[in-house]
Image (tube, rainbow, N blue to C red):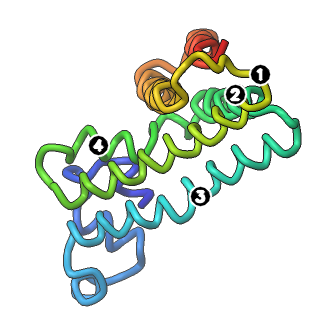
């Protein structure tokens, strides 16, 4: 996953992949079937690890603070903090995958769509909870807000790949969260 995340699907060579995994080419083919099958497996691995951690953190922050809005703001703050670290300029794995393979690999694209939808669903649940508590505008469509938050988070990470200017990224995060007002 780290090789695909850093280099992208096309630029990741079999040599890069086998070296990172400590496998021979024949073992890679025996285990995964090929580069594309490995790539699809990494999308699932991302969902089970990184995305599950993100969604768990969103829920945990809501429990800790008692505020969905504060939890969402903290998630955006965390994204900025990660993006400005020297190793943080890789962007979002799912966003990178979507850009690179959306039109050329329908199977992988479907998995990326499902994973993006899970992120959206996590934001949706938080927005609904915040609306129920009266801390997020209830006259706004919760699903539309969740989509906006998902898009803004991915956009922030794309911008960070280009220029990890912390002040600019904090502006993006602040405005993204302001849609909840």
Quarter of the image containing the C terminus? top right
Pick whichever of labels 3 and 4 is earlier in the sequence.
Answer: 3
> How far from the left and from the top, in percent, is residue 47?
48, 59
Residue drawn 47% across the image and 59% down it: 46
Quarter of the image containing the N terminus? bottom left
Kindly identify which residue carries mark 3.
52
Pick whichever of labels 3 and 1 is earlier in the sequence.
Answer: 3
Kindly identify which residue carries mark 2.
131
Label 3: how many residues lie within 10 Å, few (<14), some (14-19) or many (20+)?
Answer: some
Between 152 and 6, the residue placed more toward the observer is: 152
Pick whichever of labels 1 and 4 is earlier in the sequence.
Answer: 4
Q: CA distance from mark 2 to mark 1?
A: 6 Å
Dividing the picture into quadrants, the one containing residue 28 is: bottom left
Q: Is residue 49 left or right of residue 110?
A: right
Specify the label residue 135 is tagged with: 1
> How far from the left and from the top, in percent, is residue 56?
69, 53
Contact between labelled residues 1 and 2, with CB atoms less than 8 Å apart: yes
Kindly identify which residue carries mark 4.
98
Q: CA distance from mark 3 to mark 4?
A: 19 Å
Residue drawn 56% across the image and 10% down it: 168
Between 38 and 10, the residue placed more toward the observer is: 38
155 over 114 or under it: above or below: above
> How far from the left and from the top, in percent, is residue 117?
42, 46
Residue drawn 29% across the image and 43% down it: 98
Q: CA distance from mark 4 to mark 2?
A: 31 Å
Q: Is residue 126 left or right of residue 7?
A: right
Q: In the rendered image, is residue 21 in sight?
A: yes
Nearer the observer, disc 1 or disc 4?
1
Nearer the observer, disc 3 or disc 1?
1
Contact between labelled residues 2 and 4, with CB atoms less than 8 Å apart: no
């Amino acid at each position: 996953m780290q090789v695909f995340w850093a280099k992208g699907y096309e630029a990741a060579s079999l040599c890069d992949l086998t070296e990172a995994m400590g496998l021979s080419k024949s073992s890679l083919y025996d285990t995964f079937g090929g580069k594309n099958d490995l790539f699809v497996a990494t999308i699932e691995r991302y969902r089970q690890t990184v995305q599950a951690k993100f969604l768990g953190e969103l829920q945990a922050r809501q429990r800790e603070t008692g505020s969905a809005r504060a939890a969402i703001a903290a998630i955006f703050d965390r994204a900025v903090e990660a993006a400005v670290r020297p190793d943080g300029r890789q962007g979002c794995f799912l966003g990178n995958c979507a850009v690179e393979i959306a039109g050329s690999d329908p199977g992988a694209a479907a998995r990326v769509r499902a994973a993006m939808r899970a992120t959206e669903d996590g934001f949706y649940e938080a927005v609904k909870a915040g609306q129920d508590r009266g801390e997020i505008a209830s006259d706004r469509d919760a699903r539309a807000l969740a989509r906006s938050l998902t898009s803004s988070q991915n956009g922030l990470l794309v911008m960070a790949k280009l220029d990890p200017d912390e002040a600019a990224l904090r502006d993006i995060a602040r405005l993204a969260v302001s849609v909840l007002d």
